[in-house]
Amino acid sequence: MPKSLVQRIVDAPWFQRGIIAFIVLAGTLAGLETSPAIVAQHDDWLRRLDALVLAVFGVEILLKLTAHAPRPWNYFRDGWNVFDFVIVAVCLLPLDSQFLAVIRVARALRLLRLVSALPKLQLLVGALLKSLSAMGYVSLLLAMLFYIYAVAGVHLFGKGSPEFFGDLPTALLTLFRVVTLDNWGDMFVAQLAHAPGLKVTFYFVTFIVFGTMITLNLFIGIIMNSMSEMHEEIAAREAATHAPDGTLIEAVRELETELDEIKQRAARLRRRIESE
């Protein structure tokens, strides 16, 4: 099958939609396998459909490798392609019943291939990954805030309310519940029985403002900034792909490949003449 034909097949919208449909089918099968009743009644069909899904994914990888010929290793330069290959490879490993849970988890992870199949999801995930470095500093700031308020909570409320502020780990867990706004009012009222209302109000209100309102907005701002950067990178990548220079470079690469083949043939012919 010529490379150009394989490339057209891989880039065709119907091919992409078909792969998305099989990814959704793989996720559905992973969910059905959690029901013992369904597995007991339709185990044969589930196995056949799962084998069909794996076969389709395997053919997809082979087609994409062929589309990158004569440099099939370029397929692995894309991180999403590596992710797809690893997921399919794990599902194809000949593991015994002891690793059945691992196989089922890998089957469920096949649904994550939607990220590589849908550009919009790639944008979201790429923005999240890009924002991890900046989030590290915000997380460090949040950890410092937790530690300071936990130590203060142990000293202020530890004796009167040991179930919430008896020690540092308990106080940290309590503050985690407060920052998620999970029934924080009950903990607030519980402290009013043992401490002055102004002290309790100042403690909880300031922690919620700094820990929830401000920090949450910082995370949102970092993610939005990363999404803007990802939009620019994707736009630049598409512009480079469709630019004439990109086409010219690809043509030069193909010409270099043909020249290498001609040199190899000439070298073989020269050795044959010399041997005669």
Image (cartoon, rainbow, N blue to C red):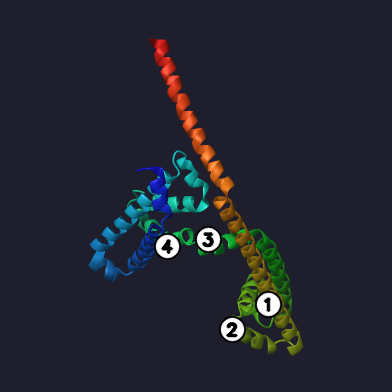
Q: Nearer the viewer, mark 3 or mark 2?
A: 3
The label on residue 183 is 2
Q: Could you say where residue 217 lies in the image, as x and y percent from the top left?
A: 67, 73
State how far apart marks 1 and 4 are (Cα): 33 Å
Which residue is identified by label 1?
A: 213
Q: Earlier in the sequence, mark 1 or mark 3?
A: 3
Residue found 28% across the figure and 66% down from its top: 39
> What amino acid type is highlighted by mark number 2?
Asn
> What amino acid type is highlighted by mark number 1?
Met
Is mark 1 in CB contact (under 8 Å) with mark 3?
A: no
Q: Nearer the viewer, mark 1 or mark 3?
A: 3
Is mark 1 in CB contact (under 8 Å) with mark 4?
A: no
The label on residue 122 is 3
- Asked if one can make out residue 172 in the rendered structure from this viewpoint, the answer is yes
Quick one: label 4, few (<14), some, or many (20+) residues within 10 Å?
some
Quadrant location of the C terminus in the rendered image: top left
Q: Earlier in the sequence, mark 3 or mark 2?
A: 3
Give the camera-side residue of 78 and 242: 242
Give the camera-side residue of 216 and 276: 276
Secondary structure of residue under mark 2: loop
Q: Earlier in the sequence, mark 2 or mark 4?
A: 4
Quick one: label 1, few (<14), some, or many (20+) residues within 10 Å?
few
Q: Earlier in the sequence, mark 4 or mark 3?
A: 4
Which residue is identified by label 4?
A: 111
Q: How many marks?
A: 4
Secondary structure of residue under mark 3: helix
